[in-house]
Image (tube, rainbow, N blue to C red):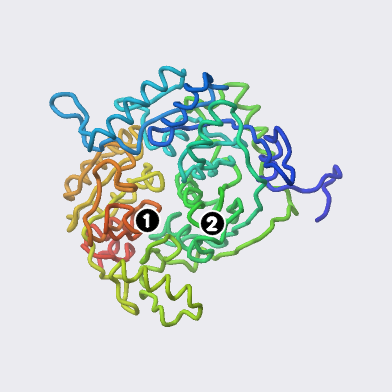
Amino acid sequence: MSKRSDGSQPRTIIDKVWDAHVVRAETPDAPAILYVDLHLVHEVTSPQAFTVLRERGLKLRRPERTLATMDHSIPTLPRGADGKWPFVDAQAAAQVSQMERNCAEFGVELHGLGDEAQGVVHVFGPEMGATQPGMTVVCGDSHTATHGAFGALAFGIGTSEVGHVLASQCLLQRRPRTLAVRVDGQLGPGLSAKDLILAIIARLGVGGGTGHVIEYLGPAVRALSMEGRMTLCNMSIEAGARAGLVAPDDTTFQWLAGRPRAPKGAAWDEAVARWRALPSDEGAAYDRELRLDASALEPMITFGTNPGQGIAVTGLVPDPAAERDASARTTLEAALRYMGLVPGKPIAGQKVDVVFIGSCTNGRIEDMREAARVLKGRKVRTRTLVVPGSHRVKKDAEAEGIDRIVREAGAEWREPGCSMCIAMNGDDIRAGQYCVSTSNRNFEGRQGPGGRTLLASPLTAAAAAVTGAVADPRRVLEGR
């Protein structure tokens, strides 16, 4: 590794953000203490943490750096005629009311049900301008890596760690290894960031990123919108990585400018100047590297029970007999048995019962627009839920007439929430049903006991909705 002109060693953006937040350095016996710039909380993983604070007589260390919303348990159906929300059960209602009490008691800014800023936590945070380059961000949710799209180091944490951050504004972490994923070329028509990340995870496997933070690099990544970059980083955890990020650039700054929590005036100019120094230095070394050509990719879809089991929509269901490794063969056999798929058969044409378009992976305005491209002038042949990721997304989509396109196609236009991604709120599928979903996990029972999930992009999901089967969105858009 060559030194820079000032004599220092070149560093990756991961190193720069980490080094700027170390309160106490890591030792062989103890993790580093890392300062947290932004803590996002929601109604499912925070109640126990607030209870611990209450029992120990503790206050929030930095309440102004904590931001709350509701998303997991909330209904995506509107209020009833009586003004009440149609919660799926008493537990969901209790989680929401407890969140309201906790935030009021501890002085946390909450954007709850009925608030025009409310949304899925990883859609809501960036929309507020709360997520900014160079930050450390945490949330009690696996897909916190979404915020890495802004050049932030963002970790999902457990409930006990939520309590630690509320009380101390710090987190115990071991320094991660670094993994560069370089994507050359450009994505072709009918492809998106979702196809790219599914292809990356198929290459890496669900454990390929374990212990690493991924930096996504290359012209195909730079060409993505901020919505696309958020989709890309969102699923880093599905490759086993601790986080994933993209270095900030003008695309980042233009997206952030003017948002409620973004710096203003001279402070904005100073922030941008600081952010421009974040990208990895020339010659910076990574622990590992992976290279892909985006131009060679086709629309992707999963066929199994983990996000690494993905193929092109034009591909064949893999045959376990072709697996040389006995463990991999057993895993594949179990997945196909659960999914009810036949080895060697084309995945295209597989009957679909339900389509879900939404989630923190693909619930943004760009995703709504892509789905509408396919739905416009067509009728769905499956039950189809389209769930905006936030009230802002919903409002913007309705201003563009997307809600009318969705309804005229025969699909359901819902209120914002996590919805069928995790099926905690009553939005679920029945045993044996196949669902093409724009969410991030296809584990057994993820969308309902016995349900079978196939992960895909909004375009591919919408193509499945209008054909009633897995389909190549390029052919649907071409009218073939």
Please tell me which residue is depicted at 51% across the width and 57% down the height of the picture: 239
- Of the numbered discs 2 and 1, the one sitting upstream in the chain is 2
Q: Provide residue 338's location: percent of width, then percent of height.
A: 31, 67
Please tell me which residue is depicted at 72% across the width and 42% down the height of the picture: 26
Q: How far apart are marks 2 and 1 (CA)?
A: 17 Å
SS category of the residue bearing label 2: helix
Q: Do residues under tags 2 and 1 come within 8 Å of each other at their CB atoms?
A: no
Q: Quadrant of residue 121?
A: top left
Q: What is the three-letter code of the residue carrying label 2? A: Ala
Q: What is the three-letter code of the residue carrying label 1? A: Ser
Q: What residue sits right under mark 1 in the picture?
A: 457
Q: What residue sits right under mark 2 in the picture?
A: 220
Residue 74 drawn above or below residue 338: above
SS category of the residue bearing label 1: loop
Q: Is residue 306 left or right of residue 424?
A: right
Residue 440: tell me if it is visible: yes
